[in-house]
């Protein structure tokens, strides 16, 4: 179960990296519009789903609580991305652009937490590694 958790955590990290790629592709489109960001939005829903599955698998794998909490944090931060985008779109103009800056900063927090999950899950999946040492 812990090896499965490690694989899911790696998938989550890959999806987060892909999100940055898709956001940049949309932003640097020759004529960026709402349609340019559609793949980024679609994968965003996938990141939420993967993060929720990672949290459930972490809880059932009986890993340290901090790892379960970090997994839940990623899911919450991923949902927050949609809230930030909705607020920024509603504000429009310069205030909306500033709020969209929080979207990028929150994305970095998601990446950092996802990296931590991958590292800790990888340590726990190695044979002979006590659970306390991995946290």
Image: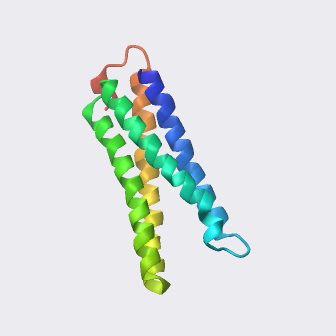
Q: Is residue 8 visible?
A: yes
Q: How many marks?
A: 0
Quarter of the image that includes the N terminus: top left
Applied colour scheme? rainbow
Q: Position of residue 5 (x, y in %)?
A: 44, 28
Quarter holding the C terminus? top left
Placement of 106 over or under 30, stated as above or below: above
At a point 27% along the width and 37% down the height, the residue shown is 66
Residue at position x 51%, y 29% in the image: 7
Q: Is residue 102 above or below residue 130?
A: below
| Residue 98 seen in the current view | no
The picture places residue 34, in percent across and down from the top left corner, at 61, 71
Which x, y percent locates residue 80? Answer: 37, 59
Looking at this view, is 132 or 89 the one in front? 89
Q: Residue furthest right?
A: 30
Judge left or right: residue 124 versus residue 39: left
> Viewed as shown, does residue 68 lie left or right of 50?
left
Please provide percent x and percent y for residue 94: 47, 85
**Image point (66%, 74%), residue name:** 32
Q: Residue furthest top?
A: 128
């Amino acid at each position: 179960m812990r090896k499965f958790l490690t694989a899911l955590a790696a998938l989550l990290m890959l999806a987060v990296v892909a999100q940055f790629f898709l956001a940049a592709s949309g932003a640097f489109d020759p004529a960026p519009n709402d349609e340019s960001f559609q793949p980024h939005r679609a994968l965003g829903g996938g990141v939420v789903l993967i993060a929720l599955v990672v949290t459930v698998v972490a809880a059932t794998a009986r890993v340290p609580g901090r790892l379960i909490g970090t997994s839940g944090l990623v899911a919450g931060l991923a949902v927050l991305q949609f809230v930030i985008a909705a607020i920024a779109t509603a504000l429009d103009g310069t205030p909306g652009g500033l709020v969209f800056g929080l979207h990028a900063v929150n994305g970095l927090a998601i990446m950092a937490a996802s990296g931590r999950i991958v590292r800790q899950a990888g340590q726990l999946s190695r044979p002979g590694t006590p659970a306390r040492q991995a946290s």
